[in-house]
Image (cartoon, grey):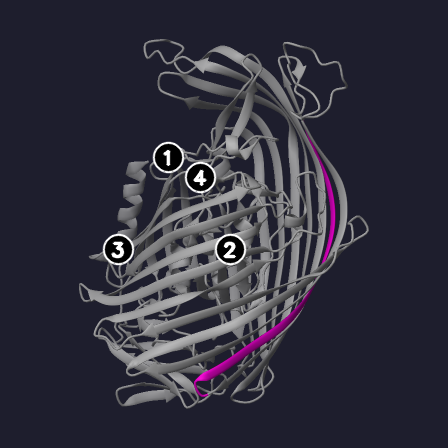
Amino acid sequence: MKNQLFFLLISLILVSVSSSAQNAILKGVILNENNTPVQGANITYKDTGTQSDKNGVYQLTIPTNQEVEITISHISLKNMQFTVNLEENQEYELNPILKNDIEQISEVIISGRERKVVEGITTLDPETIRTTPSANAGVEGLLKSLPGVSSNNELSTQYSVRGGNYDENLVYVNEIEIYRPFLIRSGQQEGLSFVNTDLVRNVDFSAGGFQAKYGDKLSSVLDITYKRPTRLGATADFSLLGGSVSAGGISKNKKMAAIVGARYRDNSLLVDAKKAETNFQPRFADIQTYLSYNFSNKFELGFLGNVGINTYDYEPLREQVNFGTLQTVQALTVLYEGQEKDKYETYFGALKGTYRATDNLTLKLIASAYHTQEQEYYDILAAYALGTVNTDIGSENLGEVEFSEGIGSQLTHARNDLDALILNLEHKGTYIADKHQLDWGVKYTSEDIRDRLQEYEIIDSAGFSIRPPLFDFVNNQPYSPFATPIVPFTNTRAINNAKIDRISGYAQYSIRSTIKESEIWANIGVRAHNWNISGSTVNSADSQIVFSPRAQVAIKPDWESDMIFRVSGGLYHQPPFYRELRDSLGVVRPNVKAQQSIHVVLGNDYSFSMWKRPFKLTTEIYYKKLTDVNPYTIENVRIRYRARNNAEAYAQGIDLRLNGEFVPGTESWVSVGYLKTEENIDNRGYISRPTDQRLKIGVLFQDYVPTIPSLKMYLNMVYQTGVPGGSPSYANPYNFQTRLRDYRRADLGLSYVLVDKDKRLREGHFLNVFRELNLGFEIYNIFNNQNAITNTYVRDAASRRQFSIPNYLTPRVFNVRLGMKF
């Protein structure tokens, strides 16, 4: 294998480059923050420049191999300055957003491929997202390298932020809220992220302390903006895990723009590498589109659509998991019968109209519909043996199970169906007067949920059916027989038809000013949310309402050092969604209240130069005090709520991130986070929450060979201390506070650029049909670490003990990628 890889790299390196142009081209579309094209913007350097046309399109020819300072200005918008250093024949596409609000507290600086926004949120480069290696590549894969963002499952796009769970994160695409399937229970059933990275233009992320204009969640905001194409083009990316294609273009009159992307993914490569023997075909496919039409300079209409189909055909065969200590190695051997067939279909469509009534007033109307049809059907019989492994190095039976001390079986059954329709109608407005800005919005949401939950689990140990450990009897099996009918160990049956009507709104005021020579920005706002739950199978409940005041202040002192200080926070509420209303028995409890969090964040951004290259150190200290907490347990990534507000909690920590050009022309970063989060259930004392991720270190490193800049390397590494490993059914969480092993993972990607914007082959070469072409080789989990997502608990009938068996994730896996742009 090594010889083949060496030969491949040598062959790629022999590709020659020819280029003779002495200029480069800077082009794109200039927009305001409402995604409306800006006409008449001046794009200048020195005494040369151009203007954007009525559709915001511009193109500027600049000299190469030198730093060129560009200024983009408009009479009614804030100026933008940046520096570029382009190579010969390079075409650099930049679609800047000129700020007309007072949230921009510093200039945007662009150097080479890096776009650095000095605000209270983290901005990620879409190109870095597309090239970073990850078993589940995409926006979420890159987020997991940031401080405060945690996930111990590389097969999942779910993530937790600063002690919150997976249901506490907001996701927007072009200001439209995105929803996820309801029944997701394991990493192998995550499918695709909604966000298609081929369509992304901008990615902003806030880990807490966000403004009132964002929705009612407790943890984070991921704000995605899709592209508005400026030319006809297409992309394609293929690998052993699947592929994606996209195409976009703009009409001759520049009014109509469209981009569409299709993806297919098959995780069989990752699943087959695991120790379990299965016939498993997890297949995911979706198609997305974003269309926009400028009826005039004042009105634009956009459409966002998505269709996703995920199917899972799962037939487990055999599995052996070794655990214990070096002196006493034990093994769980499982033989399976049966299969699982799951299917998730989601349909999403949204219309967004933007009307710029005057230079100061912008009005928006958004209508969206989300429909999901989901099913989980399985009947799986697992016959297991718990035994001792032979550890005698000189023995012929080394590694084999010598003695079985526990034998039993488990039958799991489910027929779960869910049909959900969510409709939204929202109005947003923005009024700007000099250094003042007023934002407001009102939203109506209708949620219609039809749910059938039918699950049971039967456990048999040495011929004795294990009964639930309820309080109405003493379970003395197998020593004393219990002469009652056999009942399942767990049994959940429910049919729910629930309807939730919500009205929410916000108003916020922002101002930018100066104190002496220091620049200051402040924002204060409030959200309100009212909801009512009804349904034929749900007990009626009174409507509930919550108010969430929030504020942010940032100051940029007039110091020689480039620093920004921030303080933000407020009162955050999370009104219950359907999954939070349904308890472990499937009963919907309509009186569940909104979880509440008092959130305070102190931050500092320090921008500096090192090795004559730009760097930024971001530091944030945060504290959350949570009340009316709805406790939950996590089974893989399936969350089961108690549907009761019977707990309080807190989360506190510190996040640091150093990012910059460790290698000239590339962005890399190192992030470190410390978190402590605990909860107090029924006043029994504080214990660790399921997301108590104490220490987190993440590294994203990009590099290239100086003498062969077309040969690039991407390294994504994460180290996290272990989270609590969960507890068995009916168990008291206060008795199960053992932690999983530390999560350690490193993914490596090698890429060779055959063709790109600034590298063309000789005239007439067949590869010149591509605008970009690269071949990549990826290694997931380089060091083959055994990471566990959770524990499976197995009873030993002889000793009546329960053993926690770790559920391991993927080992080392190799992948090959081919990417291209036309």
Q: Nearer the viewer, residue 252 or 458?
A: 458
Q: Earlier in the sequence, mark 1 or mark 2?
A: 2
Q: Which residue is mark 3?
A: 704
Question: x, y (%) of residue 275?
Answer: 47, 28
Q: Which residue is mark 4?
A: 723
Residue 230 in magenta? no
CB within 8 Å, label 4 to label 2: no
Q: Which residue is mark 1?
A: 785
* Distance between mark 1 and mark 3 Cα atoms: 26 Å
Q: Quadrant of the N terminus?
A: top left
Q: Nearer the observer, disc 4 or disc 3?
A: 4
* Distance between mark 1 and mark 4 Cα atoms: 17 Å
Q: Is residue 561 something that shows in the picture? A: yes
Element class at badge 4: loop
Q: Nearer the observer, disc 1 or disc 4?
A: 4
- Residue sticking out furthest to the right: 536
Q: Earlier in the sequence, mark 1 or mark 3?
A: 3
Element class at badge 3: strand
Disc number for residue 451: none
Q: The disc labelled 4 sits on which kind of residue? A: Val
Residue at image point 47% right, 19% down = 331
Residue 643 falls left or right of residue 2: right
Question: x, y (%) of residue 570?
Answer: 49, 64
Disc number for residue 244: 2
Q: The disc labelled 2 sits on which kind of residue? A: Ser
Q: The disc labelled 3 sits on which kind of residue? A: Tyr
Element class at badge 2: strand
**Which contiguous range is marked in magenta?**
434-457
**Which of the 4 quarters of the picture holds residue 79?**
bottom left
* Distance between mark 4 and mark 3 Cα atoms: 36 Å
Q: The disc labelled 1 sits on which kind of residue? A: Asn
